[in-house]
Image (cartoon, rainbow, N blue to C red):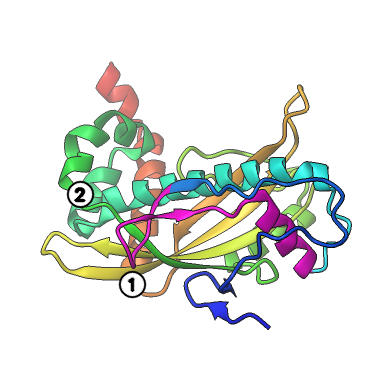
Amino acid sequence: MSKLNPLNYMPATLSQSPDSRQTIHLPTERETSSIPRGDTEANWEYPSPQQMYNAMLRKGYDDTPEDAVESMVAVHNFLNEGAWAEIVDWERRFSRGLAFGWQACRKGEEGWVEDADRIASPRDVAAPKLLRFQGRPNEMTPKARILDFMGRMYPAKYRFVHNPWWCDIHVDKHSCEPPFDRHDWYVQRRTVDGQTKEVRYVIDYYSAPPEPTGEPVFYLDVRPAVDGPSAAAERMMRWGGDVWYRASGARARETA
């Protein structure tokens, strides 16, 4: 039995060999992600389609269509790139402390989109790195449990809504489904004084109703885990800053 890699809680060696039940060839090339590793100067690599197929079989998904594996890998990679982009956005706001974080959040999400490069240039913020990650598909986050409960209790009021920063999901009355996956990502944050700090992010992966063209739709809810008062403050600042800025009419006054 393979030992688990402590960086991703997966077998240390991912087989590239075709399974004996396999009927078609699957590529063994691995795509390099944009996500920096914490243990080397390299970036994380995504599994090849062959490795993905072998992993699905190992988990008991014997009915996985072989001709769909390459598309599954493409979606997997796309979603994880999106999750990392959200984490980088959180780090741009809060890696320099809560005071700077409030300045980045006080004008809401629209203000951040307009001013991000001016007040938090990527050149001025040390890039975060992904130290390790863990898939926890059978362990719903507290937030996901609450949304799932509310969607079942009040299906007419909780519909799929894509919020531009927290990518939140409200459950549609025709699809009261919980997240199909959950990851915990452990990120290395470098502070302004050169120190490093480990920050755990939780990611809920949701499926949404498809586009009229039939294309699948996914939403991610990415946020720091509430492992301490700082993370709680970060989440409150981002949510509260956006809500207050819009509710107070600040945008209308500025553009009047």
Point out residue 3 in the picture as x, y percentages from the top left corner: 59, 82
Point out the stretch of residues depicted in magenta.
34-59
Q: Which mark is residue 12?
A: none
> Measuring 73% from the left and 53% from the top, which residue is drawn there?
151
Q: Quadrant of the C terminus?
A: top left
Q: Position of residue 19 (x, y in %)?
A: 80, 61
For the residue marked with disc 1, what is the amino acid? Pro
**Percent x, y of residue 161:** 62, 39
Residue 125 — which label?
Answer: 2
Up-down: is 73 above or below 53? above
Q: Is 9 placed left or right of 149 in the picture?
A: left
In this view, the residue in front, 88 or 8, is 8
Residue drawn at 56 percent across, 63 percent down: 183
Q: Amino acid at mark 2?
A: Val
Q: Which is nearer the eye, 185 or 71? A: 71
163 relative position to 103: left or right: right
Residue 54 on the magenta span: yes
Q: Quadrant of residue 112?
A: top left
**How many other residues sit within 10 Å of disc 1, few (<14), some (14-19) or many (≥20)?**
few
* Residue at the farthest top position: 256
- For mark 2, does the 10 Å Cα neighbourhood hold few (<14), some (14 to 19), or many (20 or more) residues? some
Helix, strand or loop status at disc 2: loop
Is 91 colored magenta in this rendering?
no
Closer mark to the observer between disc 2 and disc 1: 2
Q: Which residue is mark 1?
A: 229
Residue depicted at 63% across the width and 50% down the height: 28
Q: Residue at x 53, y 44 (%)?
A: 167
In this picture, residue 183 sits left or right of residue 111: right
Q: Are marks 2 and 1 in contact (CB under 8 Å)?
A: no
Residue 219 percent location from the top left of the image: 61, 44
With respect to residue 40, does 114 lie above or below?
above
